Amino acid sequence: MNTPTSILASASIESSVEARVDAYDWKALTGELDSFGCAVLPQLLAPEECHAISSLYPQEHHFRSHIIMARHGFGRGEYRYFSYPLPGLLSGLRTALYPHLAGTANGWNERMGIEERYPDEHASFLKQCHAAGQTRPTPLLLQYVPGDFNCLHQDLYGELAFPIQLATLLSEPGRDFTGGEFVLTEQRPRMQSRVEVVPLRQGDAVAFAVHNRPVRGAKGSYRVNLRHGVSRVRSGMRHTAGIIFHDAR
């Protein structure tokens, strides 16, 4: 029988995760990201993998820091940043997802007039982060109970920031918790803000813009500013795993 530890640290996890990620229709997902700033990857994780990750939360040796949101005005709830080495499953996902998103990221920067270009492989990008003094891992595990919420924010931790990240829902809506919807807002120049509420089931992931993205207008592309958050959890407990591709100072 597989234990949570064996599920997360299997010797074959990296190759199996890569095949799983490659199987998505990335042309369609890229279109969603370009059109709406977010795209859902259905059932990225199996239920037993979701449980294995969420069960790590009370095990402090896996993490480098513990954040209580209310102390910092971030909302209500808490989260922990993983330490290196990451659990094999999360490390494999981070490595496998990045190349599929790097092309979109570079295209966005070109359209927004930003000179920064991202390498094809995640290991190369991490070397750039570490050379810039951003050496602390950013994948995190979030936990919410009734009344908790996450204020609209952006996950920026230094000068280098990869413009797309992922959040994977580890709990099942309606069974494990109610409320707690993932929310994305887009602030457009001289226009009212647009809101995207993303319905997720257990194991689904949403890829979304971290900070800015380009939008095509009548006179070419213009830049919009995005923030993400989580609405109030009304009952139960909600766990989410976040995969951020840049490291932090």
Image (spheres, rainbow, N blue to C red):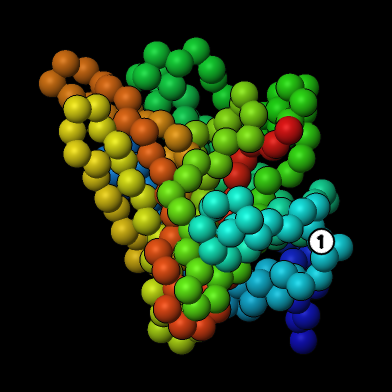
The location of residue 125, given as percent across then percent down, is: 67, 29
In percent of width and height, residue 4 lies at: 75, 76
The answer to whether any part of residue 97 appears in the image is yes
The relative height of residue 117 versus residue 71 in the rendered view (above or below) is above
User: How many C-alpha atoms fall within 10 Å of the one at disc 1: few (<14), some, or many (≥20)?
Assistant: some
- Measuring 73% from the left and 58% from the top, which residue is drawn there? 66
**Residue 24: image x %, image y %?**
45, 54
How many labels sit on residues? 1
Q: Nearer the viewer, residue 12 or 225?
A: 225
Amino acid type, residue under disc 1 in the picture: His
Residue at the image point whose x is 60% and y is 57% from the top: 69
**From the viewer's perspective, is 91 left or right of 239?**
right
Residue identified by numbered label 1: 62
Q: Residue at x 35, y 42 (%)?
A: 37
Residue for point 31% across, 59% down: 197
Towards the viewer: 42 or 69: 69
Q: Quadrant of the N terminus?
A: bottom right
Estimate the x, y position of residue 27 in percent, counting from the top left. 36, 42
